[in-house]
Amino acid sequence: MSAPLLEITALQMRFQGITALKDVSFTMNTGAITALIGPNGAGKTTLFNCVTGMYTPTSGKVTFDGHDITALPAYRVSRYGIARTFQNLALFGGLSVLENLLVGAYQQGSSGLLQGALRTPKTRREQTASLAAAHEVLAFLGMEDTANVLPSELPYGRQKQVEFARALMQKARLVLLDEPMAGMSTSEKAAMSVLIRRVRERFGISFLLVEHDMPTIMEISDKIVVLDFGEKIAEGTAEQVQNDPAVIAAYLGTDHTAAV
């Protein structure tokens, strides 16, 4: 069997006297859609921040494609092929949709500040390639008509898709989605679920997502990891998790089957 794409090993994160993560371990394979669920304050976003280099864990290890990325800064983690979206929209309001996508391509370029200022041939080639890639992503998402508008002019669900598209521009192998369905209507959630699957099938991208919409999670995920008070209390398929007594008690509730 091939090695896992992402491996979390005995991860701990403490903030002074508070333990946000305690000995959390799990793996995910290439091409998988893995969900991270649990009550508010369970440590889900903290784990995201540890994976993406925004936090350095107190102890434990994060391995991506065989590389130890535990203590690397965020910009170096990104270059390994990890991108993320945020719970709250983090788009540049003064830039068009197309320009927001081009920001996502910046990390993949190799031209320095001086080359950019001098508009060297290498810089121009990279800019041309990034522009073509941005139009390709917009076309794939069916958003060509939004290229020159400001994100604020779009419905909330479309703004979420712009942020998703910007993550794709980073040419990531793993995308972390922090509540991608939050604030969406039922139809927008369905569209986002279809989009995630299409991107996985077309580009082979793996997804680790935090989401509170249980019907969506149970339907889209290959595997679900459940956190409670910073500890992993369950891991498995949707069927296994929704029938786990510890998960029912801590998060889903006794009437969860009516919701899923």
Image (cartoon, rainbow, N blue to C red):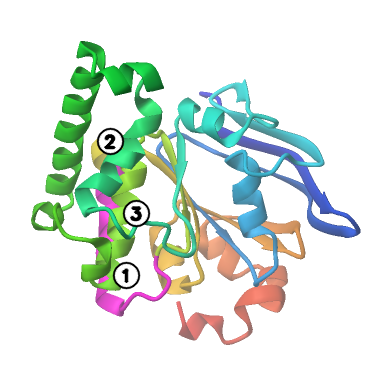
Rendered position, 103 above or below 191: above
Where residue 199 appears, as percent x and y from the top left, is 28, 45
* Circle 3: residue type: Glu
* Circle 2: residue type: Phe
Rendered position, 203 above or below 138: above
Where residue 140 appears, as percent x and y from the top left, is 15, 46
The residue closer to the viewer here, 244 or 91, is: 91
The residue identified by callout 1 is 189
The part of the image, by quadrant, that contains residue 132 is: top left
Where residue 19 appears, as percent x and y from the top left, is 84, 57
The residue identified by callout 2 is 203
Residue 33 visible in the snapshot: no
**Would you say 134 lies left or right of 220 here?**
left
Label number found at residue 117: none
**Would you say 169 lies left or right of 20 here?**
left
Q: Earlier in the sequence, mark 3 or mark 1?
A: 3
Q: Real-space Cα distance between discs 2 and 3? A: 17 Å
Rendered position, 181 above or below 131: below
Q: Real-space Cα distance between discs 2 and 1? A: 21 Å
Residue 201 visible in the snapshot: yes
The residue closer to the viewer here, 259 or 131, is: 131
The residue identified by callout 3 is 163
Rendered position, 44 above or below 12: below
The residue located at (13%, 54%) in the rendering is: 148
Q: Which residues are magenta?
A: 181-200
